[in-house]
Amino acid sequence: MYRRQFLSLSAALITTPAVSRAQDGALKLRELYEGREFSPLARDLEGTTIDVDGYMAPPLQADSNFFVLTKIPMSVCPFCETEAEWPNDILAVYTRRKFDTVPFNRKIIVTGALALGSYRDPDTGFLSMVRLENARFSYG
C-alpha cells in the first residue's frame, strides 16, 4: 500500500467512527442525543434502518403496534406532555404489526427506520421526538 493511499484511508476512518459504530451493532439510546438535541450520528442515520437496545416499557394500550423503549427497565410507561419535556433516554417504537409484550426487565434489540422530529400518535396522544418505524424486535 502506498503512503498516500494509507493516509487517505486513515483520514476516512478517523472522520466516520460513529457511522461505523452504528453499522457494527446496536446503538445505545444515549448515542441518539447530544444534550437536549439530536446527535450528529442521529441526524446522519435519519431514514436508515438501525438497531437500538433497551427495555420495553408497558404499552399505553392493549393490542397496539406501539411501545416505548427505555435505557433502563421501567414498570410504567414514561409519558410526556410537551416537546420541551421529552426525555433523551426513551424511544418510541412503531412495529409492523401488533405484538406480545415483553417483561419490562428483559433486554431487547429493536430494528427499524429512524425518524426524527415531533410526532403525536393519533390513537394514544403520545408525543415522540425520535422513533423507530416499521420496527421489529428480538431478545438481546
Image (spheres, rainbow, N blue to C red):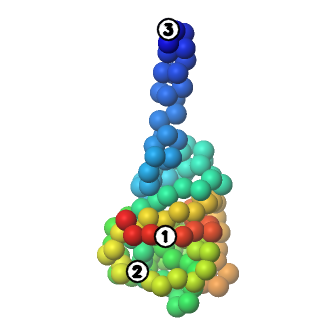
Q: Which residue is mark 3?
A: 3
The image quarter containing residue 78 is: bottom left
Q: How far apart, in angstroms, are the residues tagged by discs 2 and 3?
A: 53 Å
Q: Which of 61 and 118 lies nearest the eye of the viewer?
A: 61
Q: How far apart, in angstroms, are the residues tagged by discs 2 and 1?
A: 10 Å
- Residue beneath the point at 52% across and 91% down: 62
Q: Which residue is mark 2?
A: 102
The relative height of residue 50 versus residue 118 in the rendered view (above or below) is: above
Give SS at disc 2.
Answer: loop
- Residue beneath the point at 52% across and 41% down: 19
Q: Which of 5 and 104 lies nearest the eye of the viewer?
A: 5
Residue 8 as seen in the image, left or right of residue 76: right
Residue positioned most to the top:
3
The image quadrant where one finds the C terminus is: bottom left
Q: Which residue is mark 1?
A: 137
Q: Residues within 10 Å of mark 3 (few under 14, many from 20)?
A: few
| In contact (CB < 8 Å): disc 2 and disc 1 | yes
**Of pointers 2 and 3, the one earlier in the residue sequence:** 3
Q: Which of 51 and 91 lies nearest the eye of the viewer?
A: 51
**Residue 115, position in %: x, y?**
63, 60
Give SS at disc 3.
Answer: helix
- Residue beneath the point at 51% across and 77% down: 67
**Residue 42, position in %: x, y?**
55, 50
